[in-house]
Amino acid sequence: MTSPWLLILGMAVVTYIPRFLPMLLLSKKEISPSFSRWMTYIPVSIFAALVASDIFFWEDGFTINPAINIKLIPSVIVFLIAYKTKNLMWSMIFGIGGITLLWFVF
């Protein structure tokens, strides 16, 4: 049986290496402006992929039927509120409230 501390240390090393190696290898190199501009889109695209997969996959299956997937209606409402108000707090309140309400209704 593996020690929990050894397991935690191993996971820490494995997650630290992909962060440290690029920093070590690229710290002395000049990065092109086009590559730097391309890198600015990575956080947005990762966030969009995480949100889209959470919205459209319901109970281990892809569905866009609002009668089955209760996440779709609050997602559309949150999108409209975020677009209209540009306010994260209102988006969160309506999103959490909408999914909670639909969860208890259905």
Image: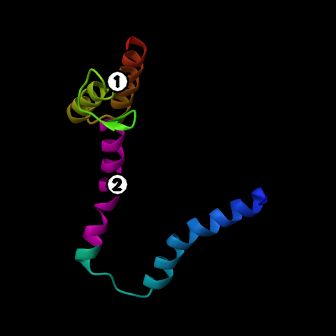
Image quadrant of residue 1?
A: bottom right
45 and 54: which is toward the camera = 54
Give the residue drawn at x 38%, y 30%: 92
Q: Where does residue 33 sit, x and y in percent of width and height?
A: 25, 77
Name above or below for residue 65 compared with residue 42: above
Local crowd at mark 2 within 10 Å, few (<14), some, or many (≥20)? Answer: few
Residues in magenta? 36-56
Q: CA distance from mark 2 to mark 1?
A: 23 Å
Taken as a whole, is the magenta stretch helix, strand or loop?
Answer: helix
Q: Nearer the viewer, residue 79 or 82?
A: 79
Q: Secondary structure at mark 2?
A: helix
Judge from the rendering whether residue 22 lies leftward or rightward of residue 64; answer left or right. right
Tell me which corner region of the image, top left, top right, bottom left or bottom right, holds residue 30: bottom left
The location of residue 38, given as percent across then percent down, is 26, 68
Image quadrant in which you'd find residue 76: top left
Q: Is residue 46 magenta?
A: yes
Left or right of 77, for residue 22: right
Q: Which residue in the structure is indicated by mark 1?
A: 94
